[in-house]
Image (cartoon, rainbow, N blue to C red):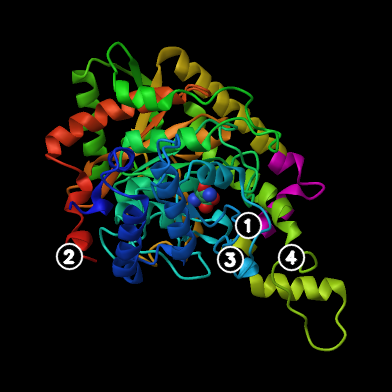
Amino acid sequence: MTDLTRLTAADLAEALTSGEVSAREATQAHLTRIAEVDPAIHAYLHVAADSALATADEVDAARAKGETLHQLAGVPIAVKDVMTTTGMPTTCGSKMLQGWIPPYDATVVRQIKAAGMPILGKTNMDEFAMGSSTEHSAYGATRNPWDLNRIPGGSGGGSSAVVASYQAPLATGTDTGGSIRQPAAVTGSVGVKPTYGGVSRYGLVALASSLDQAGPCARTVLDTALLHEVMGGHDPMDSTSIDAPVPSVVEAARRADVSGMKIGIVRELTGEGFQPGVQARFDEAVALLTEAGAEVVEVSCPNFQYALAAYYLILPSEASSNLAKFDAMRYGMRVVPEGDPSAEQVMAATRDAGFGDEVKRRIILGTYALSSGYYDAYYGSAQKVRRLISDDFAAAFARADVLVCPTAPTTAFAFGDKLDDPMAMYLNDIATIPANLAGVPGMSLPSGLADEDGLPAGLQILAPAMADERLYSVGAALEARLLDQWGGPLLDRAPALTKGA
Ligand code: GLN
């Protein structure tokens, strides 16, 4: 039998539906793969073998009875550890929540369970989703399957690494400034941040509520579309959830058509500052889109140069407020200093021990930006810049159906490279952050291997809010042409994988 871990979610779903493969076999194959490779990659913080197999058995029993099942029933999935899950820990990569088993499922998790998808476990991430490398996880970094000495991106490096190393065909992610798209780019996988409000945030441990958005991670554009349709939809439990049907992204991915579309290259997000190999693969991919019948135009978004500065005021402001709930009183860790400490001393000792350096840095930045006397100068100005960035998008989308640029300026960097220089780490998200500030959807897909280091580069596609399906038709059209050129999936060339990691 073919190795079930190598199948796409779409192919696995077909094999399950036809009865060729059972959900137990599919789940067991992935659990075996996890046992083989995850000690080297460290993408999972928790593996839920028993409950995954129990779900698989339920699916097999239901199928045997002839019940109508969801098309992804029996297809295993990994869940980012920022999403609450009953019966499994949710730590957010933080010591603060070590061992916490939530009393409820995030809406996204509930939808995954309702589809009958066995949850293999929870994936590693930068603490509270702050970072671009997973080096800020309190449980140790995840390694990039392409090169075990390099970062898998962040904050959702665990989710991208599991799909890139065939430890799950699908994984969930969250993207506040790029945490789905940048890890996808540096691991040679696909990741999508849907339109803000397109996927429920209920049960996601909040980083910055006005920017956070959950979305799918997979190895192909069609697979991300299949998962997007499971995750998406209106949720009355989330006040910013869009009350509209989920966009028809699967149909768009199957259509894979760009003929007659206008593709805008964002001038400010190409060229200078981008690694030559990343830029070269991007230019070639754009040429392929032209061959496929798209018209390419150049657009300018002059205010994008302020996106990073605005983001690093808005995000810490919202994060400092969201993280105030970790006060040692209600849940999470509690450290009680010697003697007869006051509540304030317990809080201080707990936060000192429970939060890592990056989290503390952002809480301090956020409280400062929100403090009286500084609020207008910092937070207020950042909100005005946010509006200008939305205006830039509106002007660009008046001229183009989608925008494209490289997803990240470089390929995966080495561990420790940017750890002592927060600004250098932040710069990795220069191309992904504008979409979060404006709420528009974005996808990253592999564009090829950079010449300098042989590591994957990512191409980003951005669409207007609520037009998520455009990402999928353009992405799938490009992916089909790239696969022809490569003669098979890019991931087949990952050296650490072929050696069995
Ligand atoms: N890397 C960005 C940050 O550190 C994005 C994080 C995210 O999207 N969760 O804030």
Q: Over which residues does the magenta segment extend?
A: 362-379
In front here: 442 or 266?
A: 442
Q: What residue is disc 3 on?
A: 94
Q: Secondary structure at mark 2?
A: loop
Q: Secondary structure at mark 1?
A: helix
Residue beneath the point at 88% across and 85% down: 340
Question: 10 Å neighbourhood of mark 2: few (<14), some, or many (≥20)?
Answer: few
- Residue 297's image quarter? top left
Q: What residue is disc 4 on?
A: 331
Q: What residue is disc 2 on?
A: 499
Mark with earlier residue (1, 2) = 1
Marks 2/3: CA–CA distance? 32 Å
Tell me whether circle 2 and circle 4 mark residues in contact (CB < 8 Å).
Answer: no
Q: Say left or right for 361 vs 401.
A: right
Q: Secondary structure at mark 4?
A: loop
In front here: 269 or 222?
A: 222
